[in-house]
Image (cartoon, rainbow, N blue to C red):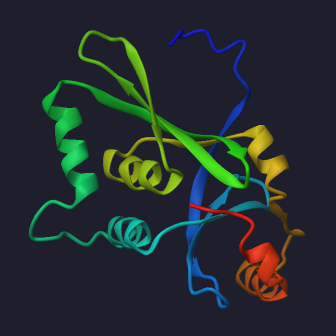
Amino acid sequence: MSENSASRPAHLDVEIRGLIVDPVSNSPIVILKKPGENLFLPIWIGVFEANAIALQLEGVQTPRPMTHDLLRSVIDGLGASLEGVVVHSLVDNTFHARVVLRGHGGELVEVDARPSDAIALALRCRAPIRVADEVFRDAHALDFREGEDEEARLREWLESLTPEQLGKYSM
């Protein structure tokens, strides 16, 4: 991977706004938000990944390492670091992400990952989470009005989805 990002699409830092459960399918959804804007990106994820994200967000320590803790320890043990994660595309209604590592010798390595796993790892490594501009556009991210109640609007949006729309995005 080249360190020259001139030919790469813009990646925007995001924050995790929260985890919610789709009321129809009972599937967890992680909500990413562009800081300083009212633009939200919902990504449907698996139950186990939602649990891994929730544990980290809530600061819960498990008695034994979870999978994402193990991966963080492997990265540290190899003298590498997590530079960040990027949700870089939406292909056939599936979000794709990369984990960007800096090796012991300074080289950058990108590893394909599910967004949910990448986010869980980024939280444990205190690394940035980024989303490509076109993913916000292609996924039809939610844009709220200033001062609008985010939680109520998210709930209203979820309840308005048809079964076909709910099945649109896969893990």
Residue 138: % across, % down? 83, 48
Q: Is residue 92 above or below residue 99?
A: below
Residue 54: % across, % down? 40, 72
> Residue 17 vs residue 102: left or right?
right
Residue 64 falls in image quadrant: bottom left
Q: Looking at the image, which residue is at 15% across and 60% down? A: 65
Residue 107: % across, % down? 36, 11
Residue 158 falls in image quadrant: bottom right
Quick one: quadrant of the C terminus? bottom right
Q: Looking at the image, which residue is at 24% across and 56% down? A: 67
Q: Looking at the image, which residue is at 25% across and 25% down? A: 80
Residue 61 falls in image quadrant: bottom left
Asked whether 114 or 119 is in front, the reply is: 114
Q: Is residue 168 above or below residue 150?
A: above
Q: Is residue 171 above or below residue 125?
A: below
Residue lying furthest right: 145
> Residue 17 vs residue 60: left or right?
right
Residue 89: % across, % down? 68, 41
Number of numbered discs on residues:
0
Q: Looking at the image, which residue is at 75% across and 79% down? A: 154
> Residue 131 vs residue 119: left or right?
right
